Amino acid sequence: KYYFNDVNHKTKILLDNDVAIVKHSKIRQYDLLDKVFLYEKRIWLKLKNDTKTLDICINSQKLKLVFNDRCINDLSLVLKVLAKQKKQRSKNSNLWLFADMSWRADDNAEHLYRYIMQNHPKQKTAFILSKNSTDYPRLKKEGFRLVDPRSFYFKYLIYKADKIISSHIDKYIFNALGGDTLKTKDFIFLQHGVIKDDLSRWLNQRKIDTFITSTKAEYESIAGDFNHYKFSTKEVVLTGLARWDALIKNNVLNTKQIVIMPTWREYLSGKVQKYGVRGRNPEFVKSLYFQKWQEFLCSKELEKLAVRHGYNIIFTPHPQVRIYLEDFNLPSYIITSYKENMQELFCRSSLMITDYSSVAFEMAVLKKPVLYYQFDKDEFFAKHSYAKGYFDYEKDGFGKVFVESSDLFCYLGKKINHLQDIAINNTQYQSNNACKNIFIKIKSK
């Protein structure tokens, strides 16, 4: 990689004095005070075992080569390090280790694991899940090979595995054996949802070898040039989410159910405890987030709409909110749901109300509308661990955006008997045979 300011510069790359074939490239943008400060170009070349020299010229000026903080004149040291890594990698077993959350399944890793178990039974696999998880008995009965993340056997499997496949990037996995846990392994990031905001500050810290995306816009926002991500077409693939196969298959139409699913605010989190579990934040009930959503859920307008039109109202709190459920003091007609299958919940619902959550894409795949309640837009993007991305809720969203709950209830009252009339954008999703496509991509790496 090298750094530059002139986007029109000319590059010449030679391997043993022959023009090199660039397999992948990426231009990453660095900003300072909201202005472009510098560009970084990453280039991937395929080296032969006997390749001796690499020359890179920018506008006819030859660059000095630095590898592992050392200036080098040839590729002997590079090839030596690559050979050592290959030797270390050869000690891995042909084992694929899957994980959603340490204490919860029902996400993309579970769905991909099931597909491989049923269609490629010779592939060695294991699924990481706490024995205390409510999903443990269900998956055990189904035939999943389960391993508890607190066990020594888990560490042994991490050591032996060749591929780690997860919908989350949790410390108990990437730091299981220290900072170099994933150095000689492939990490396949299945994702928890569709990325619509700029998560580069967080994701750039991690080693991701295969990065799953689901829409062309999402793919381009990460793998394309002139954004803040380090990832390129080398890592990023467009396959769709593994769980979408079952989601589309099991869709139910003409139901009377509204699901309310706000996303979390990371800045409200309590202290991290073991295995990524967060403790209570004593200031949570004073937050605007808590006060606004409690007011929304306890409002008479919502109750009148539900009773008058015969709708079930399902509140599905974010996993980080569940420890505060009693503080909400919800009315009895609202059903609190977080133990049931999320897929079934989306399939049976006719409308979703959220704020910024990417679960809205699940409804969009099912061609069902979403209403956005965004009372804290400025605060959300100012304080969260990511910045606003390519996705514009007003233009790209799957229904209308509201700042005031009264406006949302007024609009919903007019549309509740004609939800199909709520305009949904026509975003194209890669949603057919996602599990098969992901499996092929993993095997090809």
Image: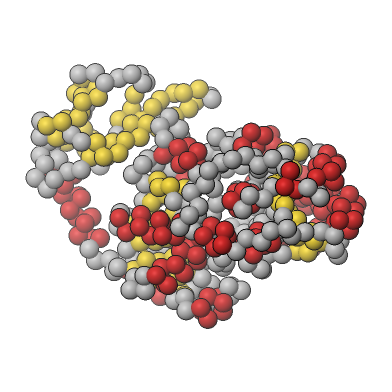
Q: Residue at x 78, y 64 (%)?
A: 335
Q: Quadrant of the C terminus?
A: bottom left
Compared to 329, does 114 lie above or below? Answer: below
Q: Is residue 34 left or right of residue 63?
A: right
Q: Nearer the viewer, residue 150 or 387?
A: 387
Q: Nearer the viewer, residue 368 or 182?
A: 368
In which image quadrant can residue 115 be found? bottom left
Q: Is residue 323 left or right of residue 176?
A: right
Q: Residue at x 20, y 30 (%)?
A: 13
Q: Is residue 4 visible?
A: yes
Q: Position of residue 145 (x, y in %)?
A: 44, 76
Q: Is residue 57 left or right of residue 367?
A: left
In which image quadrant can residue 371 be found? top right
Q: Residue at x 72, y 52 (%)?
A: 351
Q: Residue furthest bottom?
A: 141
Q: Position of residue 309 (x, y in %)?
A: 86, 56
Q: Quadrant of the N terminus?
A: top left
Q: Is residue 381 visible?
A: no
| Callout count | 0
Q: Is residue 22 left or right of residue 26?
A: left
Q: Position of residue 417 (x, y in %)?
A: 81, 50
Compared to 264, does 380 lie above or below? Answer: above
Q: Position of residue 404 (x, y in %)?
A: 81, 39
Q: Residue at x 64, y 33 (%)?
A: 395
Q: Nearer the viewer, residue 22 or 172?
A: 22
Compared to 221, does 131 lie above or below? Answer: below
